[in-house]
């Protein structure tokens, strides 16, 4: 039975419905709580319907935004430091 389940997961790995049901199925299997699994699946589908993104896509976009913010801050710090160094050189040569 277990081999058939694993084989069917590999065969159906490209199907969106099977991967969408995989998380709640694991939750139901581990905890035995069907209500929790159905709530998890329902909230994920409601979120996707409302925003067009899955929860994992929201997390990925949040991480990417934070990464971009850090990159911009780093560039600004480098720019300010280079201008400070240029001004120090100009001031030291005027003395």
Image: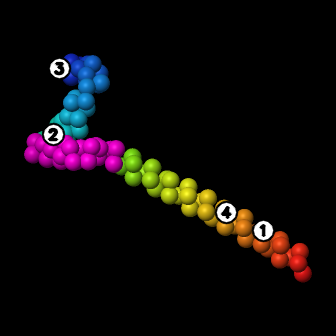
Question: Where the N terminus falls, by quadrant?
Answer: top left
Report the Cα–Cα distance between label 1 and label 3.
Answer: 72 Å
Instruction: Specify the farthest residue to the bottom.
Output: 95
Q: Secondary structure at mark 4?
A: helix
Q: Are marks 1 and 3 in contact (CB under 8 Å)?
A: no
- Disc on the earlier residue, 1 or 3: 3
Q: Front-most of 4 and 20?
A: 20
Q: What residue do we see at 30% from left, 24% from top?
A: 14
Magenta span main SS = helix
How many marks can you see?
4
Question: Where the C terminus falls, by quadrant?
Answer: bottom right
With respect to residue 19, does 32 lie above or below?
Answer: below
Residue 43: percent from left, percent from top: 18, 47
Instruction: Specify the farthest residue to the left.
Output: 35
- Nearest to the eye among marks 2 and 1: give it: 1
Magenta segment: 34-58
Q: Secondary structure at mark 1?
A: helix
Report the Cα–Cα distance between label 4 and label 2.
Answer: 53 Å
> Going by the image, does 90 lie left or right of 46?
right
Q: Which residue is mark 3?
A: 1
Q: Which residue is mark 1?
A: 86
- Disc on the earlier residue, 4 or 2: 2
Few, some or many residues within 10 Å of mark 2 (<14, 14–19, 20+): some
Few, some or many residues within 10 Å of mark 1 (<14, 14–19, 20+): few
Report the Cα–Cα distance between label 4 and label 1.
Answer: 11 Å
Residue 91: percent from left, percent from top: 83, 77
Q: Which residue is mark 2?
A: 28
Q: Which residue is mark 4?
A: 79
Report the Cα–Cα distance between label 3 and label 2.
Answer: 18 Å
């Amino acid at each position: 039975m277990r081999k058939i389940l694993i084989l069917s997961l590999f065969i159906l790995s490209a199907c969106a419905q099977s991967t969408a049901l995989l998380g709640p199925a694991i939750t139901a299997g581990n905890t035995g709580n069907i209500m929790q699994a159905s709530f998890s699946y329902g909230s994920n589908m409601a979120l996707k319907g409302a925003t067009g993104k899955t929860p994992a896509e929201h997390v990925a976009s949040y991480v990417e935004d934070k990464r971009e913010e850090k990159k911009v801050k780093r560039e600004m710090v480098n720019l300010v430091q280079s201008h400070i160094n240029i001004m120090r050189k100009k001031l030291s040569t005027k003395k």
